[in-house]
Image: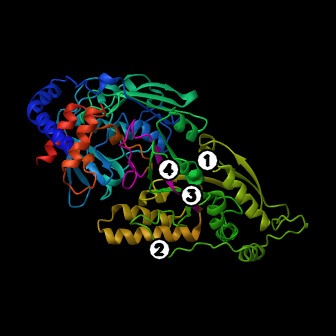
Amino acid sequence: MNKIIAMLSIAILLCSAFSGMAIAKEDSGMADVTAASAGEKVVKISGDDWGYSTPFAHYPRGPGYIRMSFIFDTLTWKDKNGVIPWLADSWSSSYDAKTWTFYLHRGVKWSDGEPFTADDVKFTFDYTKEHPQKWYKAKEIDHVAVLDPYTVEIHLKESRPTFIEDVTGSVPIIPEHIWADITDPNKFRGDEAVTGTGPLKLVEYVPEQGYYEYGANTKCFKGKSLIDRFISMEVSDDALALETGDIDATSFWGKEIVAKEEFENNPNFEIITGPSFWVRKLYFNCEKYPTNNKTFRHALAYGIDRKKLVEQVMLGGARVANTGIIHPDSPWYKHGLPGYKYNTTKANEILDSLGFIDTDDNEVRNYPGGGDIEFTLFTNTKDEANFIHDNLEVIGIKTEVKVMSWKELDPILKNGEFYIAISGHGGIVQPRTLYTFYSYQNDEYDEIYKKQLRTMDEDVRKELVGELQTIIADDLPVYTLYHPLMWAVYNPDKLDTWFYTKGGVAVGIPIAQNKLIFLFDAWRYDADEDGIIDKSEVIDAIQDYFDGRITKGQAIEVVKLYFL
């Protein structure tokens, strides 16, 4: 009890005696050095090479975007509960959702010290029309108007009630004074190329080692970073590297549930469970015979035992996927879609009816004109591919598994150089994800997809999104296999702010590396999330101050919330 009273007394003393001085220091750019006195704070995670961290050069998958987002900010962002203001303090839209007005945060500076203004927002969208970003092409933009240095209007060609959800929270804003003269943004490199407003700055990038080193951006308008350096690097064994301290955090998913379980009773680590907003899919080329035949695709679906795949290959670290792609935990999920329950009898009957008969008794079905049905099964995941190879062999379809990296597989899919392939992606909590096919064309589907983007009534839009899922589940341009479970495991002594974002980061990336983990938020001490900072939570903050985890100014922020 005496310790508690003493700590509360210190809290009051910090608030009253040092608040003015701390605020003055922060306003004058004099950073509190208490935390730094114990040495530089470095956090390391496992990772791969995901391209250069600009909006135009990062690899167009979730981890590539995440690394870029540490540097470049968006007009809006998301925390663990949903959309929040970011470069824009507030916004409004016209009645038809064609004109969006953003009121920008004042005093924001780029990491080189230049001011951020509405001109940078206009420039970003204008420049992206001519030079598409990896995730965004600005096709719906009609024009952008600067009303004053801190107010910008974005005019769309059509109504887009999902503009905040689909665009402003994911499109990184770039500085006009840096990019105005860049004619080939994909090749732009160097310190100027990674000038941003985000919490981190890129210090070093070694693609051959998948090595990224970031330093704190001292000019970040959201405050001082909790860490001094952040490093992402390749390791041969994530679990071992975490156990030995070579890294401080990593992610496990799917069949890695076994590795995750090794840390469950280890007091030195904490584990958080992710939303599983990711899907592994079997892609069909719908423009090549015979995979262009919907009935043939149905037969292959009936020949794949997804339940056993989850149990035996994924070791229970996944759930059988929704055939409409959208995750079952999403509000957009359509119930009652066909699941193509494993049924080799039905699969064989369908194939027989199509005339695919084993005419030469070699246990491989033949095309009606002769010749074995044999496909190359492209994949970046060997175990799942081998399982499907064995399943399809039972119904007389021969496959040759060819394993490759993401970077090798993605161009094959995009160029339609396949019959069947296994790949996957995140973001399956939002309707936007329902346009992730290769070699599939359906005019009715396209029209419904565009219509749901323009629809103002959310109930009507939900019906349209349900229609899209119904078409996918019936046409089967892809056959969804599983949604993997996800976990982040970390050493809380190094950084304890990790979280999974509601709806995924940006357009739905299910990774516990939201850049908010680097920024101090006094409300994170509200452990019971009741909207009140109580005495015990103040004590936690004061203890973290004494332990060098937060600065004096940050401790004061918590104390102030207690006195509200």
Q: Residue at x 51, y 36 (%)?
A: 50
- Which SS type dominates the magenta stretch? loop
Q: CA distance from mark 3 to mark 1?
A: 32 Å
Which mark's residue is nearer the viewer, 3 or 2? 3
**Residue 415, labelled with which disc?**
1
Q: Are marks 3 and 4 in contact (CB under 8 Å)?
A: no
According to the picture, the residue beneath numbered tag 4 turns out to be: 265
The magenta span reads 481-508
Q: For label 2, count other residues whose C-alpha is less than 10 Å away and answer few (under 14), some (14-19) or many (20+).
A: few
Question: Is residue 143 or residue 357 the one in the foreground?
Answer: 357
Going by the numbered disc 3, the residue's amino acid type is Gly
Sooner in the amino-acid sequence: mark 2 or mark 1: 2
Question: Eyeballing the image, is 6 above or below 177?
Answer: below
Q: Which residue is rendered at x = 78% and y = 75% of the image?
A: 352
Q: Which residue is mark 3?
A: 317
**Is 5 placed left or right of 175 in the picture?**
left
